[in-house]
Amino acid sequence: MRPFTYERALDMREAAAAVAARPGAKFIAGGTNLLDLMKLGVERPVHLVDISRLPLAGIDETEDGGLRIGAQVRNSALAADPRVRRSYPVLARALLAGASGQLRNKASTGGNLLQRTRCFYFTNAAMPCNKRTPGSGCAALEGFNRIHAILGVDRAIGERGCICTHPSDMAVAMMALDATLETIRPDGGTRRLALDGFYTAPDERPDLETALHADEMITAVVLPPPLPGRQLYLKVRDRASYAFALVSVAAVLDVSDGRIRGSRVAMGGVAHKPWRMVAAEQVLDGAEANDATFAAAADAALRDAQGFGHNDFKIELAKRTLRRALSDAVNV
């Protein structure tokens, strides 16, 4: 590991200013992803600004009936919060499907959203990777790409971009719930970003993964009032615990008298970001809640999917997982 300096921030503006003042500086909270990447030589910050003690660990109800989740709320605390378990069970289940108990006790809400891909070519500094070194190429295109993306990519983009997947389970549920982020900059300026627009496309600058400025810090995630209907998170992985998703589904279905009155669907493990399944929702909304509808929704959702050889199986797996999740959501 390369040498670096460290300081502990005392307030939010000070934290953002400290990162702005030192090119190459980074925020650190739980460190569950950043420290691993530093050991591998993938991340090489010259200065770390510890934001883990900032007063951002609260979960508060908003005036409109939603929840405002501080960026330093630990994943385990968020999953255990009775308001989350009661009104946003898809989020609680996604959190509990991610990582191990020890990691959930350290990982923060903000850090979870910012965790980087587990692509083995990204974490191997000896391999070409456009995300790690823009312009160096993408080893996954011709390599072992079993875990890689099938949506939001094509070979032309991959050659100069990236076909990795985003690893978060929590973010998939938050995408289905229409979450927004709150941020702060050194001058005290704040802004709100829809989660769907927060993650950027991996085309010309795959090393830039979000719309955050370098000196901008996430302070909270805001969930809108609970959506009507049943919520479900389904994750398919290579082993029963502590594995990243090959495919995952977060689904919210409002069904009345056998007809779907509203839906929210997002998938993980299939794209560079948690992927909102708008095409599936368009098929579902207003349709009868039966297997034919779910099959049509899955076909629509994966219509533009593209495999790169080893991950071709993911297309059919994603269809089946989505179909199963929708069926289970109706029968919860």
Image: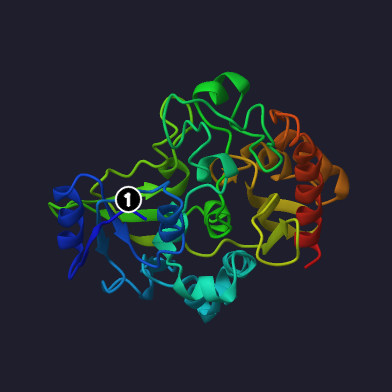
Which residue is more in the foreground, 108 or 33?
Answer: 33
Secondary element at image label 1: strand
Q: Is residue 72 above or below residue 163?
A: below
Q: Which residue is pictured at 76% across the width and 54% down the height?
A: 326
Q: Position of residue 19 (x, y in %)?
A: 20, 53
Which residue is more in the foreground, 51 or 81?
Answer: 51
Q: Is residue 260 above or below residue 331?
A: above
Q: Quadrant of residue 132?
A: top left
Q: Position of residue 161 (x, y in %)?
A: 50, 27
Q: Position of residue 92 (x, y in %)?
A: 58, 70
Q: Which residue is mark 1?
A: 192
Which residue is more in the foreground, 26 or 183?
Answer: 26
Q: Quadrant of residue 88?
A: bottom right
Q: How is the image coloured?
A: rainbow
Q: Which residue is pictured at 50% across the width and 37% down the height?
A: 126
Image quadrant holding the N terminus, namely bottom left
Q: Which residue is pictured at 18% across the width and 68% down the height?
A: 11
Q: Which residue is pictured at 81% across the width and 54% down the height?
A: 324
Q: Residues within 10 Å of mark 1 (few under 14, many from 20)?
A: some
Is residue 329 visible in this depiction of the protein? yes
Q: Is residue 220 above or below residue 56?
A: above
Is residue 222 visible in this depiction of the protein? no
Q: Position of residue 89 (x, y in %)?
A: 61, 69
Q: Is residue 191 left or right of residue 189?
A: right
Q: Is residue 327 left or right of residue 242?
A: right
Amino acid type, residue under disc 1 in the picture? Arg
